[in-house]
Amino acid sequence: MAMAAVVAAGLTRWGVRKATWKELVQEAGKALFDSVENLDRKDVDALFVGAADPERFVFQAHTAPMVAEQLGLSPRTIMRTEMACASGQMAIKAAAAHVAAGVSEVALVMGVEKMNAAPMAESQTSMACVLDREWDGVQGGSAPPFFAMVAQRHMHEYGTTREQMAMVSQKNHHFSTTNPYAHFQKEFSIERILGSLVVAPPLTLLDCSGITDGAAAVLVTSPERARDFTDQAAYIKGFGQGVQGNNVTNLGDITKWPPLTMAAEEAYRTARIGPEDLDFAELHDCFTISEIIEYEAIGLCPRGEGGKYIEEGQSDMGGKVPCNTRGGLLGTGHPLGATGVGQAVEVLWQFQSKVPEERNVTGAEVALCHNLSGAANAHHITIYGRDA
Amino acid sequence: MVEKDCVPFILDFLPQEGPDDTRIHRFYDHLREGRLTTTRCSSCGEILWQPRVVCPHCNADTMEWIDLPKEGTIYAHTAMVLGAPLGFENDLPFVIAIVRLDMGDHGHMLLFTRVDDAKYEDLAIGDKLWFKTYDCGDGRVFFRFTATAPD
């Protein structure tokens, strides 16, 4: 039996939005409430807000009560979850745990991030706060150089090519053209991706996810209550997390991500499935190389063959496990706190066949959502099923 | 002494290098003496990076300072070309590397560091790098590595 169910969803348009974070919250909340006939907001007894760094992006703390205020909620359980780029998935996990424990019956999860209020150097500094200030941040590091070194080593050890990395970007940007909520919605050729501005060699701009404003909301309830709201829920079957330090140097070999493999094994164990049971997956493609290593670390292909996996089209429609059908972080953008919730929205809408036919994985039974946070040192997985 | 009213410099609006700020201030004292050091747990003998005041392996809180090797090899490297955080815009582009230090009986250690005196294109995995003390110009010091062999 599933521990909880995602029964409704709401999204804003993601992008560089002429709107404040509170307005994004209102938009996502409206979209969710408009989509469920049988939901009275008085029935929402818990609120979980996923937001990574509003203190620095928009100089705002204590955001959860403000979300309740914007949405007219009076929850008896309320909190914000912070896990940098995985903050949204953590809010879902907190909601599911409260539902499973009987503390909440109907929980609303809101993921939000407003990243484009400040100039670029400010936003980059806010993101660099994820690093250890004392040892890594102080040297001017940020996410791209870490993942650039991961890419260099993966190319060095396994012969992964720049073209294979560009294929991840091409695929996810293509998927984003089917997603009206996505930031980019634009096709890019391999040549264009390889020739875009260098950010941190070998990574170019189109290897990197965008700096995006957006919000996403889901409603979480018990499997028993799920049918009150929808004929087809996304049932939460398992979770797994793994963490190993806060710097890539803690990973030992940076091309292998042991905490991701630990997270996947725990998620498969609790959901009583294996990687061969996955029908589609939402993987944290903050950079192209990330998705390639994730194929390997969650067991979709052998170690070192992630490049081959994308090249063979195994992560595209018609392949073994289509990945990032909504466009991923690369095509959809990466509003940190909203990303994990946006992935859950895709899973629900896939199961409900509410996504455009060209990206609908028909008959899918099992899906995996993955986020990483920090320099690939912390990994977070949720497994969803079509059936309770 | 660190000037606390200096221009904010990457995530260091509140520098914490002095004896009033941190219990590992000797790390920075050692850098000023040209030594790259860390703590080793006096109880279980584990070498800890970064320096700690309590051992995460055995819970002991007695540490001794040990010197790390002053040369290492490039395990991976890149350069920050676009998107520097505040305080680093004028440094672009700058080289970043993970340096592999040979720790003898203790295997090896990986260290995240800035690299001076070389361009990204001039370096390759396996190249030698040497430790140096970097003067931040605002009263603070930090470590970097350089591609130029010492005299």
Image: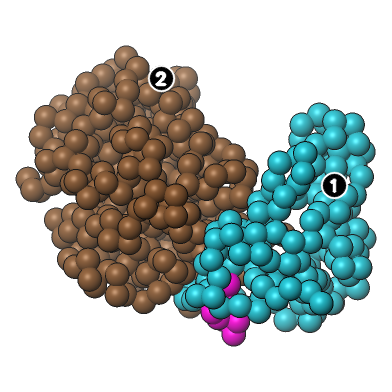
Which one is in front, B97 or A79? B97
Residue A162 sits in quarter = bottom left
Residue A381 seen: yes
Q: Which type of secondary structure does the marked residue at label 1 adopt?
A: strand
Q: Residue A238: horizontal and vertical position, in percent? A: 38, 25
Question: Which chain does the numbered disc 1 sit on?
Answer: B
- Residue A269, disc: 2
Circle 2: residue type: Arg
Which one is in front, A58 or A90? A90
Which one is in front, A322 or B39? B39
Q: Residue A190: horizontal and vertical position, in percent? A: 22, 66
Please state if A62 lies on the left or on the right of A170 as rendered: right
Q: Is residue A61 above or below residue B14?
A: above
Picture quarter with the N terminus of chain A: top left
Residue B18 seen: no
Q: Is residue A71 above or below residue B128?
A: above
| Image chain in cyan | B
| Image chain in brown | A
> For the image shown, how many numbered marks are present on the structure?
2
Residue assigned mark 1: B39
Write the residue at 90% across / 42% down: B63
Please state the extent of the stretch shown in magenta in the rendering.
B88-95
- Residue A52, disc: none
Q: Is residue A287 above or below residue A344?
A: below
Question: Which chain does the numbered disc 2 sit on?
Answer: A
Write the residue at 80% across / 42% down: B47
Residue A183 sits in quarter = bottom left
